[in-house]
Image: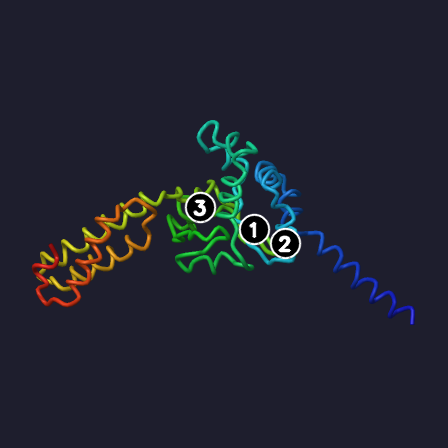
Amino acid sequence: FMKYFLTILLMCMTILAESKNDLIKVATDSGNFKILIRAVQEAGLSSALKSDGPLTILAPSDEAFGKLPKGTLEELLEPANKERLIRLLKFHVISGDVSAIQLLSGEVETLNGEFILSKIVDGQLALNKSKILVNDIVASNGRIHVIDRVLIPSPRLTKAQKMTQLIESAVNKGVRLYNNGEHQSCVEIYSLALESLILWDDGLINSELKSSINQSLKTVKGSHEADKNAW
């Protein structure tokens, strides 16, 4: 019976040893991610990276953090900027155990809900403006890919900025369609944009203008004069 005890004991010891090699421990033991580990601790995300996961970390090295503009890191680590720090760190984490080969899909969603674009640049896998230096460092709850630059999420837009972008996009598309003689398609683009603006409105559009837009949308739906309706 002793041989069974010893076999099971060895199995248990192996499992316990592996369970300790989580993402945080692997990153800490490497000695190259001191700033990242500190940022994770300041953001209160350590427990998440020690969980069962699996998670994939796009880990900027200490040297990568050194490339940030002067004062940026210190500002991010201030308690008042904790939400910004969390958003930035989640932009470096992918749900699942994702290998470097799988990252070649072209677009990868991160834990903050934003996407990273991946492509091959000069023979290296690039993620947005960063490049992977070392890939597929395996931990018990995921893996790490070392990157040479900190990934910066897109700035959060105000409602007015989003509405401005929508208008500019609709006009750019609509003008091209109109000039190509596709008047009805132009009307459809403009109508969809106006309907979206009404839905998004947060008091920026006054009631008189909103009423006028709604009336025009109703009129257009019952009209077949696409050339006129576009204007």
Residue placed under numbered mark 2 in the picture? 139
The residue lying at 16 percent from left, 60 percent from top is 187
The residue lying at 86 percent from left, 70 percent from top is 4
Q: Crowding near pointer 2: few (<14 within 10 Å), some, many (20+)?
A: many
Q: Crowding near pointer 3: few (<14 within 10 Å), some, many (20+)?
A: many
| Amino acid type at mark 2 | Ala
Task: Report x, y in % for residue 28.
Answer: 65, 42
Name the quadrant of the C terminus: bottom left
| Amino acid type at mark 3 | Lys
In depth, the one of 43 and 91 nearer the eye is 43
The residue lying at 44 percent from left, 30 percent from top is 69
- The relative height of residue 37 versus residue 126 in the rendered view (above or below) is above
Residues under numbered marks 1 and 2 in contact, where contact means CB atoms less than 8 Å apart: yes
- The relative height of residue 204 versus residue 186 in the rendered view (above or below) is above
Task: Report x, y in % for residue 189.
Answer: 21, 59
- The answer to whether residue 1 is left or right of residue 182 is right
In depth, the one of 89 and 19 nearer the eye is 89
Number of marks: 3
Mark 2 residue element? strand
| Amino acid type at mark 1 | Ile
- The relative height of residue 24 versus residue 173 in the rendered view (above or below) is above
- The answer to whether residue 26 is left or right of residue 170 is right
Task: Report x, y in % for residue 183.
Answer: 11, 62
Q: Which mark is residue 131?
A: 3
For this orientation, the residue located farthest to the right is 1
The CA distance from mark 1 to mark 3 is 13 Å
Residue placed under numbered mark 1 in the picture? 144
